Amino acid sequence: MKILSISNQKGGVGKTTTAVNLAASLSMKKQKVLLIDLDPQGNASSGAGIEKSKLTHSIYDALIEKLNMTNVIISSKDNLFDIAPANQALAGAEVEMVNIKKREYVLKSALEDIKQKYDYVLIDCPPALNLLTVNALTASQSVLIPMQCEYYALEGLSDLVNTIKKVKKKLNPDIEIEGLLRTLFDKRNTLAKEVSDQLSVYFGSKVYETVIPRNVRLAEAPSYGKSIMTYDKSSKGAKAYKQLADEIIKGHKNEK
């Protein structure tokens, strides 16, 4: 079971779009996938077609109430992957976790309930370097960092990389950077190309070959509660996420 956090404290970089569509793409490659929505905004849950107001249980219950994960997990609307959904209750979780013993390991402990049930567990982290994100990083083997190729992107990236280093040193020695994913990419934009080139210089082979283009169909899909694979599988966005799934699966086969 590969546990992969999708994290960037900067909002609007295609983090949740990547979480939902990578989950769907991996599922279409015959992988058993669980998506954990760890963002109190619950956008990954909405994007998977889940009506948050009608949830009986959410990831909050697994973290705070110690409910077994199997009672939290439901299927995405298109039945492509499973999801541990989030709603507004998760916003209070961080305050409640402060007094829990070994508070950084709460998610890791909850995941013991579903060990070996999935090929991939993807965690959609909140857009902040907070206790929920630290829980995700502590539970994960690696981190996928989606980022827009713009001026401030590299600045924010150094904060995230430093956090990952601290987690590696103190909480999870196994964690690695899985890869950097260039998102919302417009090849006509000169600055985007310059930042993309800089990323390749600093991170080399850690930068995915796959680039996610700025794509109208990708932007529309969440409002219908669908992944791009269900909404428009022939779009440029869908093709890019299929390519990313192939790249990730291939990378993991090479690790073994």
Image (cartoon, rainbow, N blue to C red):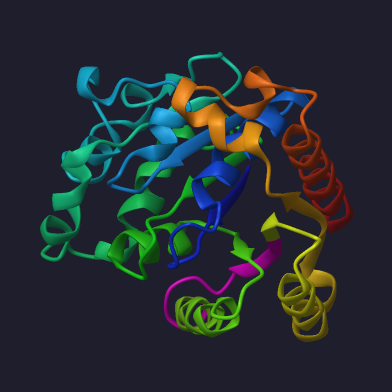
Look at 79% across and 42% down and name the residue there.
240
* Residue range highlighted in magenta: 168-181
Q: Residue 10: name its quadrant.
A: bottom left
Look at 81% across and 35% down and name the residue there.
239
Q: Residue 121: name its quadrant.
A: top right
Residue 48, percent from left and from top: 48, 26
Q: Quadrant of the N terminus?
A: top right
Of residues 254 and 47, which is closer to you in this image?
47
Of residues 166 and 219, which is closer to you in this image?
219
Look at 79% across and 36% down and name the residue there.
236
- As drawn, is 64 to the left or to the right of 142? left
Of residues 33 and 103, which is closer to you in this image?
33
Look at 50% across and 36% down and name the residue there.
35
* 205 lies above or below 81: below
- As drawn, is 39 to the left or to the right of 75? left
* 151 lies above or below 45: below
Give the mark count.
0
Q: Residue 151: name its quadrant.
A: bottom right
Does residue 233 appear in this view? yes
- As drawn, is 72 to the left or to the right of 122? left
Asked if residue 178 is among those painted magenta in the image, a careful observer would answer yes
Residue 87, percent from left and from top: 25, 36
Residue 43, percent from left and from top: 39, 39
- As drawn, is 53 to the left or to the right of 249? left
